[in-house]
Amino acid sequence: MDSINFKDLLKERGYKLTPQRQAVLDIIIEHNGEHLSTEEIYALVKEKYPDIGLATVYRTLLLLDDMDLVYKLDFDDGLSRYELNNKNEDHRHHHLICLNCSKVLEVQEDLLDTLEEQILTKNKFKVTDHRVKFYGYCEHCSEKE
Amino acid sequence: MDSINFKDLLKERGYKLTPQRQAVLDIIIEHNGEHLSTEEIYALVKEKYPDIGLATVYRTLLLLDDMDLVYKLDFDDGLSRYELNNKNEDHRHHHLICLNCSKVLEVQEDLLDTLEEQILTKNKFKVTDHRVKFYGYCEHCSEKE
DNA sequence: ATTCATGCAAATCGTTTGCAACCCA
DNA sequence: TGGGTTGCAAACGATTTGCATGAAT
């Protein structure tokens, strides 16, 4: 996601490119693969842009989510987390949440397509997206038992 | 879930059976199949037990969730919802959330077992539970397009 | 009698919003 | 210039917590 592209996307919707918005997006791009919480994003942006307000970060994340540039996550820790919405990823990945140490791993596998077809025929419900979270024990925590 | 059983389960953990706890559980059993929010549960319990406090409902739901008697749901509407944890159900069911009218349907299908096996072998992650939400359009809203 | 549970109100915490000042287009 | 944007602080809404009272075992 280069800045030219971002600016155009904003303009399409009647929005403006501001240094704050760019800074928030930059941080998320820099931390691709991580699951940053709003506060973490705020702290990281503040390093480069000390005057930014928390409300601006919230507003920007809402905007980025709405533009499908980021993906909002929920790992049941009471915080909203975000990751870069990697569009050239063939399938959305899923998260493996360890019930013991809370570590979050990722799976690329996606066998849900067949399930979605079944849902369409049996329930007449057109699935356009899904969110899956697997809970269990990671390698390290499984061994400790 | 009869009350004798409930009382024993509580005693095992050093807790007491109170009319408030029984009333909350009763409401959830009566409304099996629904996805009641905390406030909805509070209002329903209040009909039978007008003096109950909201904090008690919160505390009881936390307890019931911890005892695996109920299942906490999140339909992204900002509210915590709960459903009876039906243990004789062969598989956990999943939810179909309509992006248009927000109606929530349920699927009993569970093709995730094979996925879980793959995750165990490939990621050495022992899956013990999963949460799946499908987003899309229900029959009615699909037709309107 | 002891221990846990309740109700109430205050506190908490993440998030949203109103508004005057500000700045990008 | 003008309309979107910002930072700040106040407001918000769901949930939690402190504490004195009350109830279950």
Image (spheres, coloured by chain):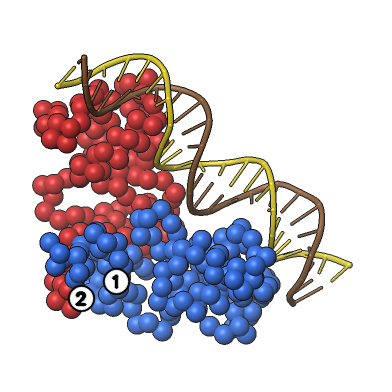
Chain colours: A blue, B red, C brown, D yellow
Asked if marks 1 and 2 touch (Cβ < 8 Å), the reply is yes
The residue that appears at 48% across and 71% down in the rendered structure is: A70
> Picture coordinates of residue B72 (x, y %)?
30, 47
Residue B28 vs B138, above or below: the answer is: above
> Picture coordinates of residue B16 (x, y %)?
20, 27
Q: Nearer the viewer, residue A37 or B49?
A: A37
Give the residue number, with chain letter if any, for mark 2. B123
* Count of numbered tags: 2
- Under mark 2, the amino acid is Asn
The residue that appears at 37% across and 82% down in the rendered structure is: A89
Circle 1 sits in a helix, a strand or a loop, which is it?
Answer: strand
- Left or right: where does residue B62 sit relative to residue A11? left
> Separation of disc 1 and disc 2 at Cα?
9 Å
The residue that appears at 46% across and 76% down in the rendered structure is: A31
Residue B66 sits in quarter: top left
Quadrant where the C terminus of chain B is found in the figure: bottom left
> Picture coordinates of residue A105 (x, y %)?
29, 71
Give the residue number, with chain letter if any, for mark 1. A105
